[in-house]
């Protein structure tokens, strides 16, 4: 079985509302320093282009590639064979609007499905899984 998921760890590098959400999950939002940093990130992300998959409110669910085997596959009777990252970003997406053509060209140069940086700078990944104890046949 092969399927694609959005990468939760990419939120560390987006410098937008996804980063804010992840920080809330990692740190204590009651802390005044953390709160001030989150406000700064949110102000920056409010100025971003809404002409994106997120701006168009396309539903998608994020998963952590470090825990996808335990959280998603094992409960479904599957085991992880491998993960392949795609849609790499040469810089945080917030910078894309400065020079979109160059951003995309540089990002394509970064594409390497097995590069460890994919855990953090690729927005999605493909999961290759197999049924535990048996072969899964797909036609």
Image: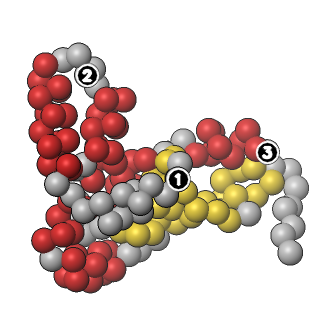
Mark 3 or 2: in front is: 2
Residue 29: mark in rendering: 2
Tell me, for residue 77, which label it has, or none. 3
Rendering coords of residue 26 (x, y %): 33, 29
- What residue would you read off at disc 1? 59
Q: Residues within 10 Å of mark 1 (few under 14, many from 20)?
A: few
Figure quadrant of the N terminus: bottom right
- Residue at (33%, 37%) from the top-left corner? 21
Q: Earlier in the sequence, mark 3 or mark 2?
A: 2
53 in relation to 7, above or below: below
Name the spot of residue 36 as percent of width and height, x first. 11, 28
Q: Residue at x 58, y 46 (%)?
A: 68
Residue nearest the viewer, comparing 17 with 73: 17
| Left/right of residue 35 with respect to residue 125 in the rendered view | left
Q: Quadrant of residue 28?
A: top left
The answer for how far apart the CA atoms under marks 1 and 3 are is: 25 Å
Mark before the other along the chain sequence, 1 or 2: 2
């Amino acid at each position: 079985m092969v399927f694609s998921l959005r990468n939760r760890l990419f939120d560390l590098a987006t410098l937008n509302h996804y980063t804010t959400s992840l920080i809330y999950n990692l740190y204590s939002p009651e802390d005044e320093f953390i709160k001030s940093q989150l406000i700064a990130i949110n102000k920056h992300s409010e100025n971003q282009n809404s002409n994106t998959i997120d701006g168009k409110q396309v539903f998608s669910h994020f998963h952590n590639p470090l825990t996808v085997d335990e959280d998603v596959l094992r409960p479904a009777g599957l085991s992880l064979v491998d993960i392949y990252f795609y849609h790499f970003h040469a810089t945080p997406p917030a910078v894309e609007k400065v020079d979109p053509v160059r951003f995309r060209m540089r990002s394509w140069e970064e594409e390497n499905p097995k590069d460890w940086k994919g855990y953090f700078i690729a927005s999605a990944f493909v999961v290759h899984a197999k049924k535990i104890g048996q072969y899964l046949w797909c036609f």
